[in-house]
Amino acid sequence: MRAHLAALVASAGGWLSFEDYMDAALYAPGLGYYSAGARKLGGDGDFVTAPEISALFGGCVARTCAEVLGAVGGEILEIGAGTGRLACDLLLRLESLGALPARYRILEVSADLKDRQRQALGARAPHLLGRVSWLDEPPSSPFRGVIVGNEVLDALPVTRFRRHAGGYEELGVVVVDGAFAWGARPADPGLAAECARRESAAGGWPDGYASELCRRLPAWTAAVTRALEAGAVLWFDYGLPRAQYYLPERDDGTLICHFRHRAHADPFSYPGLNDITAWVDFSALAEAGSHAGFEVAGFATQAFYLAGAGIESEMRAAGEAGPAAAARAAHEARRLMLPGEMGERFKAMAWCRGGVPPLGGFSLQDLRHSL
Ligand SMILES: C[S@@+](CC[C@H](N)C(=O)[O-])C[C@H]1O[C@@H](n2cnc3c(N)ncnc32)[C@H](O)[C@@H]1O
């Protein structure tokens, strides 16, 4: 991976944009974090996601899916399904709610994770495996239903920039004495305009302020949702509205790497073995939704989303298995909902079109004014 990245830096003339570096570190065929075959998610991997913590998450998302499918019919498309936990939880809960869709498709870049997903579904929901299929490209034929993406937007490669001498620089990757290091060059006019828009939303930045933005977010989200003619897109991820994301005091951005449950900030450490992520600018995501022809129908913290979507009913159902199961569900709900855990950092956003009623998950809190 290091040799491949060094070759990319050399062939780019000695300076590689961070976006291209992150793209290769995560997705280079056979080498990238998501393309190669190491254990990534779960207790023995690098990080744990909401569906990995608890089936309560999938239970709540299933309730939201049932609301949408009940109104517009159709199917589910999951983007970036990780170990397949959410797919199993969603399908099994939808079955018990009597709202099982005929088809559940998964758009996944990682061959390794596709295998893991197939195995998980074969083990936990073998009778439903026939409904599941995998896609390498976004669907091209129109369909109705729900698109779900949990913690996938944070993996989209970002552009790093810095405020400098009254203007903006783009931070890229150079090789110094055989090691990767940051190298700056003046921002192109398009990037400078994007930076200026964010700086004005944040009320000004000091010299040296560095952060990131995701230039491919609008085109990527439009591409994966284009075929949805009626229904809802549910995005879950860690992130903030723009004015908070780009606060002057958050002066080194939100780039985070994960390696065996340790979070760190050095994207040049063990490239290909570390996950590299950045927080989601939910204002940019809302703009992308509007441009893609959706109504931004809801934006709430994960805690309020789960409360509105019915986590209490999910906990009661889980608790029917006995006191130990009830205690476990309470513990898991705390991890999903407490402010110091996933409750506030993680947000839920819904994009809707074509006759979707107001969704329960967004009935208790409406943060759209903050976008
Ligand atoms: C952080 S994991 C989240 C997995 C799962 N959604 C969960 O919550 O446990 C990111 C997932 O998105 C997939 N992924 C990353 N980039 C993708 C892309 N551009 N298109 C489709 N899947 C992608 C990864 O392979 C992985 O399955």
Image: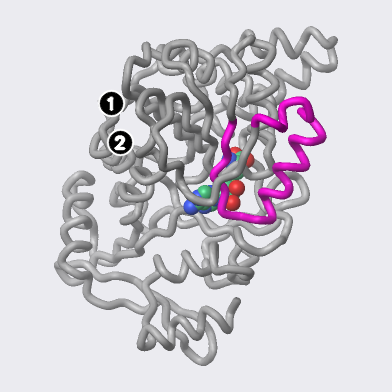
Dominant secondary structure of the magenta stretch? helix
Horizontal side of 196 relative to 253 (left or right) equals left
Q: Give the crowd class for mark 2: few <14, some 14-19, many >=20 residues within 10 Å.
A: many
Between 239 and 40, the residue placed more toward the observer is 40
Report if residue 42 is visible in the image.
yes
Q: How many marks?
A: 2
Vertical comparison of 134 with 258: above or below: above
Give coordinates of residue 125: x percent, y percent. 76, 28
Asked whether the beta carbons under mark 2 and mark 1 sit within 8 Å of each other, the answer is: yes
C-alpha distance separating marks 2 and 1: 7 Å
Query: Would you name the residue on which mark 2 appears?
Result: 289
Quarter of the image containing the N terminus? bottom right
Residue 282, image quadrant: top left
Image x and y of residue 42, in percent: 72, 45
Read off the residue under disc 1. 295
First to last magenta residue range: 104-131
**Badge 1 element:** strand
Residue type at numbered disc 1: Glu
Magenta stretch contains residue 12: no
Residue depicted at x 65% and y 13% = 314
Q: As drawn, is 318 to the left or to the right of 71?
A: right
